[in-house]
């Protein structure tokens, strides 16, 4: 089973700043990686799939990059509504696995 | 507008059974894979089960294999999860999720639309 490790566990930033979140896979997942945002009491929301494709309705300030084992989610300028937990997930093979999450909190 | 509405959660004793349902609308349910993903209280996300559009391909996580069964009824636009031999560690919010983007590989998909979740609590 592929393991996804996210870093940092917690990221403290201010609105307007740039956020960079990392996801590392224990073996190559090619480009088959997604990013999700989850706010308290809500279901996750798909942000990025295939490493760099924005899902429907996702603002352009969210971007994804990477391939193989190293991936990055970048939020170019944080809005107040962006503070949440972010998960990466691969769909390279069964089982699809999520990372443990990065909590993005207001500094 | 895509809507996924789960139901069937509740409190059950260890060893008991529950059947979760998910009613889908707003998209062509019958042509997409569907999934169940769970989240234990205060924890991360765990992919539980996936089923292909025609139910030919079914996958379950090792943690639930032999106890849970995913199924669907395309005529009713509905997804189900039959959960037997429930354990305390199965306590979680269970989300129904569709996979309409990015295709799937061996049951491994992206989850693009999600329901609000239904809470399953296994406790004596």
Image (tube, rainbow, N blue to C red):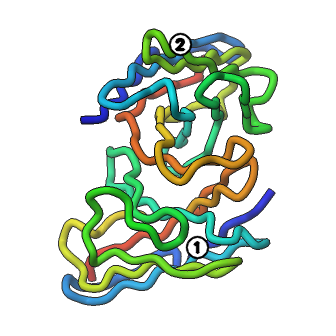
Q: Classify residue A88 by image quadrant.
A: bottom right
Q: Is residue A95 above or below residue B51?
A: below
- Using the image, determine if residue A75 lies above or below residue B45: below
* Numbered disc in front, either 2 or 1: 2
Q: Nearer the viewer, residue B73 or A94?
A: B73
Local crowd size for mark 2, using a 10 Å CA cut-off: few (<14), some (14–19), many (≥20): some
Disc 1 is placed on an element classified as: strand
Residue situated in front as seen by the camera: B123 or B4 = B4
Residue A41 placement, left or right of B8 = left
In the image, taking residue B82 as reference, residue B40 lies left or right, namely left
User: How far across and how far down the image is residue B9, in percent?
Assistant: 46, 19
Seen at 55% across and 18% down, the residue is: B80
Residue B20 in percent (x, y) is at: 51, 17
Residue B58 as seen in the image, left or right of residue B92: right
Which percent across, then down, holds residue B21? 47, 17
Residue that carries the numbered disc 1 in the rendered image: A6
Residue denoted by label 2 = B73
Report helix, strand or loop for mark 2. strand
Rendered residue at 73%/33% (across/down): B60
Give percent across and percent down for residue A28: 75, 72
Residue A72 at least partly seen = yes
Above or below residue A95? Residue B67 is above
Residue at (52, 74) in percent of width and height: A9
């Amino acid at each position: 089973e592929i393991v996804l490790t996210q870093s940092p566990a917690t990221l403290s930033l201010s609105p307007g700043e740039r956020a960079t979140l990392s996801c590392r896979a224990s073996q190559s997942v090619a480009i088959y990686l997604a990013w999700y945002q989850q706010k308290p009491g809500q279901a996750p929301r798909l942000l990025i799939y295939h490493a760099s494709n924005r899902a429907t309705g996702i603002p352009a300030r969210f971007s994804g990059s990477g391939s193989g084992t190293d991936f990055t989610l970048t939020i170019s300028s944080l809005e107040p509504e962006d503070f949440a937990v972010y998960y990466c997930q691969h769909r390279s093979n069964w089982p699809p696995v999520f990372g443990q999450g990065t909590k993005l909190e207001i500094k | 507008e895509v809507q996924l509405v789960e139901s069937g959660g509740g409190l059950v004793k260890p060893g008991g059974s529950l059947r979760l349902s998910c009613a889908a609308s707003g998209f062509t349910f019958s042509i997409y894979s569907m999934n169940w993903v769970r989240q234990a209280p205060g924890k991360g996300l765990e992919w539980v089960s996936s089923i292909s559009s025609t139910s030919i391909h079914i996958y379950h996580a090792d943690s639930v294999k032999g106890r849970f069964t995913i199924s669907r009824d395309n005529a009713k636009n509905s997804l189900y999860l039959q959960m037997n031999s429930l354990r305390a560690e199965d306590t979680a919010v269970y989300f129904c999720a569709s996979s309409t983007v990015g295709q799937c590989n061996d049951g491994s998909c992206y989850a693009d639309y999600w329901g609000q979740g239904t809470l399953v609590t296994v406790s004596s």
